[in-house]
Image (tube, helix red, strand yellow):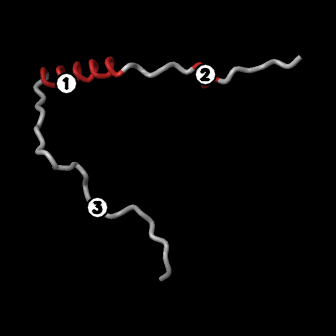
């Protein structure tokens, strides 16, 4: 008689709830500020995107 296997994907644990993540971030921010760190306020509409050479490949006739 053949033995049936159970897929491993069914046994994966669920990710932690967002509440734990938020609490973890709050604790990290508090520790950062307590150690003398400073949080900068960035104006609305300002991007951290650095514009440089494109990494897109263009295929065409020469």
**Callout 3 secondary element:** loop
Q: What is the C-alpha distance between the residues marked 1 and 3?
A: 31 Å
- N-terminal of the two: label 1 or label 2? 2
Q: Is residue 54 left or right of residue 12?
A: left
Name the front one of labels 1 and 2.
2
Q: Which quarter of the figure has residue 35?
A: top left
Q: Which residue is mark 3?
A: 52
| Residue 49 position in % (x across, y down) | 25, 52
**Against 35, is 40 above or below?**
below
Q: Which quarter of the figure has residue 10?
A: top right
Q: How many residues crowd around disc 3 within 10 Å: few (fewer than 14), some, or many (20 or more)? A: few
| Residue 26 position in % (x across, y down) | 22, 21
Q: Which residue is mark 2?
A: 10
Q: What is the C-alpha distance between the residues marked 2 and 3?
A: 44 Å
Seen as rendered, the residue at the extreme right is 1
Name the residue at 50% across, 81% down: 61
How many badges with numbers are in the image? 3
Q: Is residue 15 left or right of residue 36?
A: right
Q: Is residue 31 left or right of residue 56?
A: left
**Against 48, is 27 above or below?**
above
Q: Which residue is mark 1?
A: 29
- N-terminal of the two: label 2 or label 3? 2
**Callout 2 secondary element:** helix
Q: What is the C-alpha distance between the residues marked 1 and 2?
A: 35 Å
Name the front one of labels 2 and 3.
2
| Residue 33 position in % (x across, y down) | 13, 24
- N-terminal of the two: label 1 or label 3? 1
Q: Are marks 1 and 2 in contact (CB under 8 Å)?
A: no
**Callout 1 secondary element:** helix
Q: Which quarter of the figure has residue 56?
A: bottom left
């Amino acid at each position: 008689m053949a033995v049936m296997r159970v897929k491993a994907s069914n046994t994966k644990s669920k990710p932690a709830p967002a509440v734990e993540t938020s609490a973890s971030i709050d604790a990290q921010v508090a520790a950062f500020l307590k150690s003398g760190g400073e949080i900068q306020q960035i104006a609305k509409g300002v991007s951290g995107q650095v514009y440089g050479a494109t990494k897109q490949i263009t295929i065409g006739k020469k």
